[in-house]
Amino acid sequence: MEAAALALTLLVLLAGLAGTLLPVVPGLPLMWLALLGYGWFTGWTAYGFTGLLVTGLLVLFSLVVDQAAAVLGAKKFGASRAGLCGSVAGGLLGLIFFSLPGLILGVFLGAMALELLISRRDLASALTAGVGALLGFLAGSLFKFMLGLGLLGFFIFKTAF
């Protein structure tokens, strides 16, 4: 029975890791819930409540960093509030209609489009804001993915040794 719990936890952890790159799936919270479930099921033999608490705090911190990275990236490159809204809307629409490539392109094009249409910026400024939004989004995604790898490594290390 413990082998089944281990296998299920690993599957959920891998799904969560994929979710760090896809905003539709709450990747890191899903990974933390997998750690919680496995810990509860095994009586906290692999890792204690302290390990779960530390990983939970890291996941909460990552949610703040992810949001801040996108906003700071766009702001650093001169995006207005309209550009920020455009990057979010463009990313969601791109994901819905064109999957992961649409998400990445949508963040860029959404910020650029609303900078042009609503903020009435020139093409060079709108392009710069789009690049900033994209770089911020990619930085946040990279951070989440690296933390997800850390959570997966934590679980493997604690259950294997």
Image (spheres, rainbow, N blue to C red):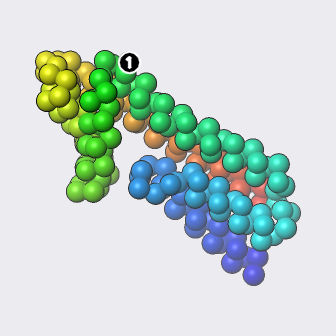
- Compared across the picture, whether 25 is left or right of 62 comes to left
Q: Is residue 101 visible?
A: no
Residue sitting nearer the eye, 106 or 64:
64
The quarter of the image holding the C terminus is: bottom right
When asked about the image quadrant of residue 118, the answer is top left
Q: Position of residue 159 (x, y in %)?
A: 77, 61
**Position of 142 relative to 83 (above/below):** below
- Left or right: residue 96 versus residue 11 is left
Residue 39 in percent (x, y) is at: 77, 63
Question: In terms of depth relative to the viewer, which is nearer, 43 or 3?
Answer: 43
- Circle 1 SS class: helix
Instruction: Give the residue drawn at x 84%, y 55%.
Output: 48
Q: Point out residue 153 in the picture as x, y percentages from the top left corner.
A: 67, 51
* 17 w.r.t. 79: above or below: below
Q: Residues within 10 Å of mark 1 (few under 14, many from 20)?
A: some
Task: Name the residue furthest bottom.
Answer: 1
Q: Which residue does the numbered mark 1 point to in the structure image?
A: 76
Residue 154 visible, this orientation: yes
Task: Identify the amino acid type marked 1.
Answer: Lys
In the foreground, 149 or 126: 126
| Image quarter (top left, top right, bottom left or bottom right) of the N terminus | bottom right
- Against 130, is 51 above or below? below
